[in-house]
Amino acid sequence: MQFLNKLLSRPSQIFQQPSTTTTTSPPQLKLTSHLLASAQEEYKAATQSPFLLAAAEGRLSKDVLGRWLAGERLYFHSYIRAAGKLLATLEFPAASQVGVGVEETVEMRLVDWVIENLARIRAAEKMLVDVAGRYGIEIVDESGEVGVGPVEPPPEGGVVGEMEGRRVMERLMDFEEEVEVVSAATTSHPKLPTVLPWLEAAVMFWGSERCYLDAWSWAKAHQPVRGSEDGDDGASDDADGGALRREFIPSWSSDEFREFVARLERIIDGAVDKEVEKGGAKVREQVLRRVEGKWKSLVIAEAGFWPAVE
């Protein structure tokens, strides 16, 4: 009788179940998202410079733009050489590996992206020269020489367009030494697997393209509305005659370019996720050690890519 009274008065205590609440850790960020979040102030400086704002507002003179374009062509040439070095480090499937799925390995997808990028860079250089010619912009190197042919590098210690960051970026994209360093580092730690020896190079390509895309997308978003009822965009009154706002900015912030950059992002993140799934936290730690420092150096260099303007 006493038990029945107790049951009726406090049933919840009699039948209370032990707590089964579990806590789950938040999902880890993709590698590229982690990198973007790791140096936000530096990234902002690299993608929101006064030079970009002046470009968006049509305040860059033809002389200033011409000097910057000369440096841009130099960087295109360095970029092409860097792409060749990256291709030389990638392992291709053996001749016996023929069949469905071979062409979809991460290395072959990366090869496809790099080759497409080479064609894109050459097309961008041709467009640069064509637009400069149509708008009367002289592509002037540091020595003051004008030309539409190959641009010669500046003398040792010189800087094209007063952009020290470009030189730093070229050094960051020297991948031959990098592969040797990665190999030596992983060999000295036999417990750690040697994963994705091309990762640093791919991150540098993705980082430079992502910064460029975000920088010119920011510039596009800050263009003033100057259109008139007759459809004139007002760019003819810009200091450069409209070359940036009509030609370069739309190209450098296009949806096509955005998707191209996103493709490499997916290649990198997918490859890293697969290796981390196999090797666990130690592999992720190794990956972060390898790329975080280079990422920050690249972003800082990107900020120096843009010359100072008043």
Image (tube, helix red, strand yellow):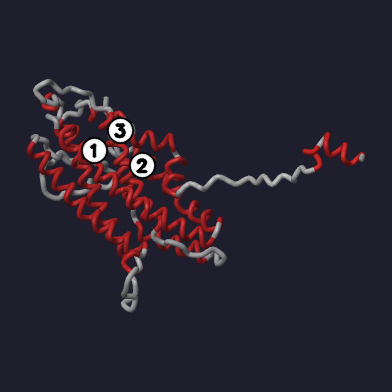
Q: Quadrant of the N terminus?
A: top right
| Residue situated furthest front in the rendering | 1
Q: Earlier in the sequence, mark 3 or mark 2?
A: 3
Residue 245 location in percent, x, y? 18, 32
Callout in the foreground (2, 1) = 2
User: Which residue lies at the image location 11% right of the left edge and 37% below the top edge?
Assistant: 138
Q: Mark 2 points at which residue?
A: 301
Callout in the foreground (3, 2) = 3
Answer whether labels 3 and 2 touch (C-beta < 8 Å). Answer: no
Q: Using the image as rendered, state which of residue 1 and residue 88 is in the foreground.
A: 1
Q: Distance between the residues labelled 3 and 2?
A: 18 Å
Callout in the foreground (3, 1) = 3
Q: Mark 3 points at which residue?
A: 218
User: Which residue lies at the image location 17% right of the left edge and 47% below the top edge?
Assistant: 125
Tag 2: amino acid: Ala
Q: Is residue 213 left or right of residue 250?
A: right
Q: Name the residue under label 1.
A: 161
Q: Residues within 10 Å of mark 1 (few under 14, many from 20)?
A: many
User: Which residue lies at the image location 55% right of the left edge and 58% below the top edge?
Assistant: 280
| Residue situated furthest bottom in the rendering | 96
Q: Earlier in the sequence, mark 3 or mark 1?
A: 1
Q: Is mark 1 on a helix, strand or loop?
A: helix
